[in-house]
Image: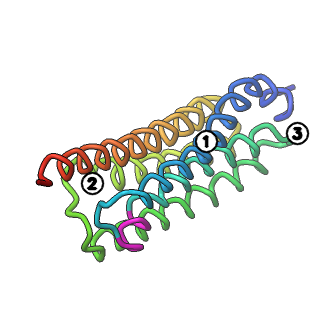
Amino acid sequence: MEPSAHVVLSQWETFYVIVGSSGAALTGLMFVVITLVADSNVPRTPETLNAFGTPNVLHFVAVLFLSAILTAPWQRFRDPAHVLGATAIAGVVYVLVVLRRMLRQTGYKPVLEDWVWHLFLPMLAYAMLFVGAAGLSHEQTWALFLIATVSLLLLFIGIHNAWDTVTYLATTRLKDANTKP
Protein backbone atom coordinates (compact mmCIF):
# COMPACT_ATOMS: atom_id res chain seq x y z
CA MET A 1 0.00 0.00 0.00
CA GLU A 2 1.33 3.43 -0.99
CA PRO A 3 1.79 5.97 1.80
CA SER A 4 -0.75 8.80 1.89
CA ALA A 5 0.09 12.18 0.45
CA HIS A 6 0.19 13.57 3.98
CA VAL A 7 2.92 11.12 5.03
CA VAL A 8 5.07 11.85 1.98
CA LEU A 9 4.53 15.62 2.04
CA SER A 10 5.33 15.80 5.77
CA GLN A 11 8.89 14.77 4.85
CA TRP A 12 9.14 18.05 2.93
CA GLU A 13 7.76 20.21 5.72
CA THR A 14 11.09 21.62 6.96
CA PHE A 15 12.14 22.49 3.41
CA TYR A 16 8.92 24.38 2.75
CA VAL A 17 8.95 26.13 6.12
CA ILE A 18 12.40 27.49 5.27
CA VAL A 19 11.60 28.33 1.67
CA GLY A 20 8.17 29.79 2.46
CA SER A 21 9.60 31.94 5.25
CA SER A 22 12.25 33.17 2.86
CA GLY A 23 9.59 34.08 0.30
CA ALA A 24 7.64 36.00 2.94
CA ALA A 25 10.74 37.82 4.23
CA LEU A 26 11.86 38.72 0.72
CA THR A 27 8.40 40.07 -0.06
CA GLY A 28 8.97 42.47 2.82
CA LEU A 29 12.39 43.32 1.44
CA MET A 30 10.74 44.40 -1.81
CA PHE A 31 8.94 47.11 0.16
CA VAL A 32 12.39 48.43 1.11
CA VAL A 33 13.51 48.28 -2.53
CA ILE A 34 10.41 50.20 -3.64
CA THR A 35 11.08 52.78 -0.93
CA LEU A 36 14.61 53.20 -2.31
CA VAL A 37 13.16 53.66 -5.78
CA ALA A 38 10.73 56.28 -4.48
CA ASP A 39 13.57 58.20 -2.79
CA SER A 40 15.81 58.17 -5.85
CA ASN A 41 16.14 60.66 -8.67
CA VAL A 42 16.13 57.84 -11.20
CA PRO A 43 13.48 58.40 -13.86
CA ARG A 44 10.64 55.96 -13.29
CA THR A 45 7.09 55.41 -14.28
CA PRO A 46 4.34 53.20 -12.88
CA GLU A 47 4.68 51.15 -16.07
CA THR A 48 8.38 50.50 -15.42
CA LEU A 49 7.69 49.55 -11.82
CA ASN A 50 4.91 47.18 -12.93
CA ALA A 51 7.23 45.59 -15.47
CA PHE A 52 10.33 45.19 -13.31
CA GLY A 53 9.35 45.45 -9.62
CA THR A 54 5.92 43.93 -9.16
CA PRO A 55 6.85 40.55 -10.72
CA ASN A 56 9.47 40.01 -8.00
CA VAL A 57 6.81 40.36 -5.32
CA LEU A 58 4.61 37.92 -7.22
CA HIS A 59 7.42 35.34 -7.47
CA PHE A 60 8.12 35.61 -3.73
CA VAL A 61 4.41 35.30 -2.94
CA ALA A 62 4.21 32.30 -5.30
CA VAL A 63 6.96 30.61 -3.26
CA LEU A 64 5.06 31.33 -0.06
CA PHE A 65 1.88 29.97 -1.65
CA LEU A 66 3.60 26.80 -2.90
CA SER A 67 4.97 26.26 0.58
CA ALA A 68 1.53 26.67 2.12
CA ILE A 69 0.00 24.24 -0.37
CA LEU A 70 2.66 21.59 0.15
CA THR A 71 2.57 21.74 3.96
CA ALA A 72 -1.21 21.30 4.17
CA PRO A 73 -2.40 17.85 5.32
CA TRP A 74 -3.56 16.51 1.95
CA GLN A 75 -4.70 12.89 1.80
CA ARG A 76 -4.37 12.50 -1.98
CA PHE A 77 -1.65 13.87 -4.25
CA ARG A 78 -4.21 14.79 -6.88
CA ASP A 79 -5.70 17.58 -4.79
CA PRO A 80 -2.56 19.70 -4.26
CA ALA A 81 -1.51 18.81 -7.82
CA HIS A 82 -4.63 20.54 -9.16
CA VAL A 83 -3.93 23.65 -7.09
CA LEU A 84 -0.30 23.66 -8.23
CA GLY A 85 -1.35 23.18 -11.85
CA ALA A 86 -3.73 26.14 -11.64
CA THR A 87 -0.95 28.18 -10.02
CA ALA A 88 1.40 27.24 -12.86
CA ILE A 89 -1.11 28.35 -15.48
CA ALA A 90 -1.68 31.63 -13.62
CA GLY A 91 2.11 32.10 -13.48
CA VAL A 92 2.49 31.57 -17.23
CA VAL A 93 -0.31 34.06 -17.92
CA TYR A 94 1.29 36.56 -15.57
CA VAL A 95 4.67 36.24 -17.29
CA LEU A 96 2.90 37.07 -20.56
CA VAL A 97 1.42 40.15 -18.85
CA VAL A 98 4.95 41.10 -17.76
CA LEU A 99 6.11 40.73 -21.37
CA ARG A 100 3.42 43.14 -22.48
CA ARG A 101 4.38 45.56 -19.72
CA MET A 102 8.08 45.37 -20.61
CA LEU A 103 7.31 46.12 -24.24
CA ARG A 104 4.96 49.03 -23.44
CA GLN A 105 7.01 50.82 -20.78
CA THR A 106 9.39 53.55 -21.95
CA GLY A 107 11.30 54.38 -18.77
CA TYR A 108 14.02 51.76 -19.25
CA LYS A 109 15.44 49.87 -22.22
CA PRO A 110 15.72 46.17 -21.25
CA VAL A 111 18.96 44.38 -22.01
CA LEU A 112 19.48 40.65 -22.59
CA GLU A 113 19.89 39.97 -18.87
CA ASP A 114 16.48 41.56 -18.21
CA TRP A 115 14.79 39.34 -20.81
CA VAL A 116 16.41 36.26 -19.29
CA TRP A 117 15.63 37.05 -15.64
CA HIS A 118 12.25 38.74 -16.04
CA LEU A 119 10.79 36.56 -18.79
CA PHE A 120 12.64 33.40 -19.79
CA LEU A 121 13.48 32.05 -16.32
CA PRO A 122 10.06 32.83 -14.77
CA MET A 123 8.33 31.23 -17.79
CA LEU A 124 10.58 28.20 -17.41
CA ALA A 125 9.82 28.01 -13.67
CA TYR A 126 6.04 28.12 -14.14
CA ALA A 127 6.21 25.60 -17.01
CA MET A 128 8.28 23.31 -14.77
CA LEU A 129 5.69 23.78 -12.03
CA PHE A 130 2.99 22.59 -14.44
CA VAL A 131 5.04 19.49 -15.28
CA GLY A 132 5.62 18.90 -11.58
CA ALA A 133 1.91 19.24 -10.86
CA ALA A 134 1.12 16.75 -13.62
CA GLY A 135 3.66 14.31 -12.20
CA LEU A 136 2.31 14.79 -8.69
CA SER A 137 -1.23 14.08 -9.87
CA HIS A 138 0.10 10.70 -11.03
CA GLU A 139 1.86 10.14 -7.67
CA GLN A 140 5.36 10.46 -9.11
CA THR A 141 7.82 11.31 -6.33
CA TRP A 142 10.24 12.97 -8.79
CA ALA A 143 7.59 15.68 -9.11
CA LEU A 144 8.21 16.77 -5.53
CA PHE A 145 11.86 17.43 -6.36
CA LEU A 146 10.89 19.37 -9.48
CA ILE A 147 8.41 21.49 -7.52
CA ALA A 148 11.09 22.14 -4.87
CA THR A 149 13.46 23.21 -7.66
CA VAL A 150 10.82 25.62 -8.96
CA SER A 151 10.42 27.11 -5.48
CA LEU A 152 14.15 27.76 -5.25
CA LEU A 153 14.32 29.06 -8.82
CA LEU A 154 11.56 31.58 -8.13
CA LEU A 155 13.38 32.71 -4.97
CA PHE A 156 16.64 33.11 -6.90
CA ILE A 157 14.88 35.01 -9.70
CA GLY A 158 13.36 37.44 -7.21
CA ILE A 159 16.64 37.88 -5.33
CA HIS A 160 18.56 38.52 -8.55
CA ASN A 161 16.00 41.00 -9.85
CA ALA A 162 15.76 42.88 -6.54
CA TRP A 163 19.57 43.06 -6.38
CA ASP A 164 19.69 44.22 -9.99
CA THR A 165 17.22 46.99 -9.19
CA VAL A 166 19.15 48.17 -6.14
CA THR A 167 22.51 48.15 -7.92
CA TYR A 168 21.00 50.00 -10.89
CA LEU A 169 19.70 52.66 -8.51
CA ALA A 170 23.00 52.90 -6.67
CA THR A 171 25.09 53.24 -9.82
CA THR A 172 22.66 55.73 -11.35
CA ARG A 173 22.77 57.86 -8.18
CA LEU A 174 26.57 57.66 -8.21
CA LYS A 175 26.68 58.79 -11.86
CA ASP A 176 24.28 61.66 -11.09
CA ALA A 177 26.37 62.75 -8.09
CA ASN A 178 29.58 62.67 -10.15
CA THR A 179 28.12 64.72 -13.03
CA LYS A 180 26.78 67.58 -10.87
CA PRO A 181 29.00 70.65 -10.73
- Residue at (27% x, 54% y) in the render: 115
C-alpha span from label 1 to label 3: 19 Å
Indicate the position of residue 139 as horizontal and vertical percent values: 70, 37
C-alpha span from label 2 to label 3: 38 Å
Q: Residues within 10 Å of mark 2 (few under 14, many from 20)?
A: few
Amino acid type assigned to the residue bearing label 2 in the image: Trp
Report the magenta residues as a range. 45-51
Say which element carries label 3: loop
Dot in front, 1 or 3 = 3
Query: Image quadrant for the N terminus?
Result: top right
Give the vertical position of 35 relative to 70 (above or below): below
Left or right for 71, reference 118: right
* The stretch drawn in magenta includes residue 47: yes
Q: Which mark is residue 95?
A: none
Which is nearer the eye, 23 or 34? 34
- Residue at (49% x, 65% y) in the render: 94
Upstream in sequence: badge 2 or badge 1: 2
Left or right for 90, reference 75: left
User: Which residue, given by chain and number where applicable, does mark 1 sit on?
Assistant: 135
User: Which residue, given by chain and number where applicable, does mark 2 sit on?
Assistant: 115
Indicate the position of residue 154 as horizontal and vertical percent values: 50, 42
Q: Main secondary structure of the magenta part?
A: helix
- Residue at (61% x, 42% y) in the render: 135
Which is nearer the eye, 101 or 77? 101
User: Which residue, given by chain and number where applicable, does mark 3 sit on?
Assistant: 73
